[in-house]
Amino acid sequence: MIDASFVLSVVAASTPLLLAATGELVTERSGVLNLGIEGMMLVAAVSAFATDDITGSAVLGFVAGAAAGVVMSLLFGLLTLTLLANQVASGLALTIFGTGFSALVGAKFVGIALTGIPKLLFGIDAMVFVSFAALAGVAWFLFRTHWGLVLRAVGDNQDAAHALGYPVVRVRYCATMFGGAMAGLAGAYMSLAYSPLWAENMTAGRGWIALALVVFSAWRPLWLLGGSYLFGLIMYLSLYVQGLGVHVPSQLVSALPYIGTVVVLVLISGGGSRGRRNAPACLGRAFHAAS
Amino acid sequence: MGLGVQLKIVARGEKSRFWAYGSPVLAVLATLLVTGVIFAVLGRNPFVALFTFFVQPLLNDDGIPELLLKASPLITIAAGLVLCYRANIWNIGAEGQLTLGAIAGGGVGLAFPNAPAGILFPAMMIAGVASGALWAAIPAWLRTQFNANEILTSLMLTYVAQLFLLYLITGPWRDPQGLGFPQSAEFSDSATAPLLIVGTRLHIGVLFAVLAAVAVQLILTRTVLGFQLRVVGFAPRAARFAGFRENRLVWIAMLTSGGLAGLAGLFEVAGPVGQLTADISPGYGFTAIIVAFLGRLNPLGAILGGLLLALSFLGGDEAQIDLGLPNAVTGIFQGVLLFMLLGADLLVSYRVKLVRPAAVHP
């Protein structure tokens, strides 16, 4: 029952979650709550798909996806960091806009199938390694480097960081753009490797699940890895069970990842105070230097 | 920067009354500009396209009734969301609560098709409100009991609600005479929302929309409860010192907004849709979030906001038929509008100044 293809399918389902959640972890550590992952992923997915379809290069597709994610995150940054808008509402706007924009651009790509991306090792594609490398890089950067410390300081005490002369807004822009690039890679992975085709709303809530994973991890990279693979497993199982022909209504099985997200959020938020203790203290707060 | 002048954002001493009303207007104008540019990029004459999108729908024979019909669910839901957002309670799962209201209210109608309308329809409305409130009670309970983030839980439950609806209309509730389409039987006459104007599709739901907005406005401005909700949103620490029971406020706001979303869902299926199908709502629950912000989190403002966004749905259909543009244009318009609203809000509390940076500090 559990063979190599099962494992590979779980890996493929987990990778976009891990990519997007790794980016959001950095964004949130700097004190910025970007709820627009779903929108960034969708715009990136369609940009990557269009680029691959036109140029025939998956590498360029991923570059386009990351770039689209960065552009979307800059929009978010402009609103929340420069214009000091509410971060929750701005993130929702990003998702609403991204959903509509990707549907408009993607209309002419519906029904086209790509070949997928080449496998590197044991049937695992390069992006899986990229997702691990990015997570390791983030863990090292956040906890072993000077600027990682600055980023965390900005997220935990914006006024103190500002008083020490660190550029709060610029650090947050960088963290937000990194989150956008990673969400972009995640979206590109969906349309270039996972499916590989474009369909409206194809991310189906994965951006939101990635957000929940960051909460689940209590903002710690290693836990993010576990959470992403747990949810990748749940997502694949809901497909797998349907394939077995078990007499369960397919919609109820498809609801499992969403119900699982709620359950995990409850367990983490209610199971002691570690979650709240680790949350960046300035998460979601606007910063406006008085002088 | 070496260039002579710089833009600088300076806090105002107090909020600008002018921009409190001016910023939504500015945002709408800016959105029209951006939408026009998008039309131009798509190779359409922007003026013709904007006219088709925003004016043409109103010139049709049934333009105004259709506008009110589309605005009703938006206003009903947004009224409840205003109550939540004012108190910093982020219910973004109204779409799911709408779906549950449609399922339960519609289910009552399907179960008793021959009951007299005078009993059946009120029963359907009660079922719709109760089930919407029940669906919102889950995130409320999870937040008050386990401190789980209501943004994520309410949204996740939206996916669950939609899958549940899909299960019902492809399984137990599927119309045996429906040729295998995923839809329920059509509602009987007594299970259909009474029309307000005969000859149009406009039903009594619009009255409930206005009622909801006025009621929420009265709660916010005239009651202790409304005062407490506003304080919790504006100054949570002060609310805690004052001894307000925050959990009670979360419950009230979530149940109210869930119930209103459920009512909107019931009116959609018992009104224009006429049966349970997979697409009972073009995203009213999400659009209502924009409506709430367009009305500056004021229930009466939400009436105006609801009308404008209802127009964007009609315009999307019109643009699709007349100009061959994809329906997704509606989503883009709505997204851009929310961006502009949030951005323009800066002007209420801050002043944007052109400053000449001092050359050398002494």
Image (cartoon, rainbow, N blue to C red):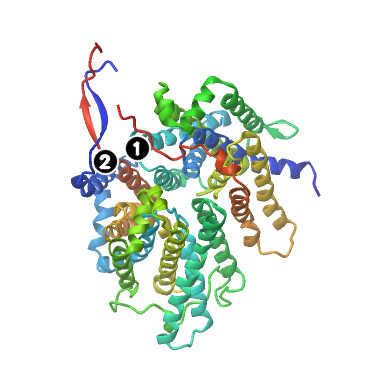
Q: Which residue is mark 2?
A: B349
Q: Nearer the viewer, residue A104 or B79?
A: B79
Quarter of the image with the N terminus of chain B in it: top left
Q: Residue at x 56, y 21 (%)?
A: A145
Quarter of the image with the C terminus of chain B in it: top left
Label 1 sits on a secondary structure element that is loop
Q: Locate residue A225, reporting x and y percent.
A: 65, 37
- Above or below: residue A269 compared with residue B202: above
On residue B309, the disc is: none
Whether label 2 touches label 1, CB < 8 Å: yes
Q: Which residue is mark 1?
A: A84
Q: CA distance from mark 2 to mark 1?
A: 10 Å
Q: Residue at x 27, y 31 (%)?
A: B9
Label 1 is found on which chain of the structure?
A: A
Label 2 is found on which chain of the structure?
A: B
Q: Answer left or right for B161 relative to B21.
A: right
Q: Nearer the viewer, residue B46 or B162?
A: B162
Dot 1: few (<14), some (14–19), or many (≥20) neighbours within 10 Å? Answer: many
Label 2 sits on a secondary structure element that is helix
Q: On the same chain: label 2 and label 1?
A: no
Q: Locate residue B42, reporting x and y percent.
A: 34, 42
Q: Locate residue A164, reporting x and y percent.
A: 42, 22
Q: Answer left or right for A2 relative to A79.
A: right
Q: Is residue B317 visible?
A: no
Q: Residue at x 25, y 18 (%)?
A: B3
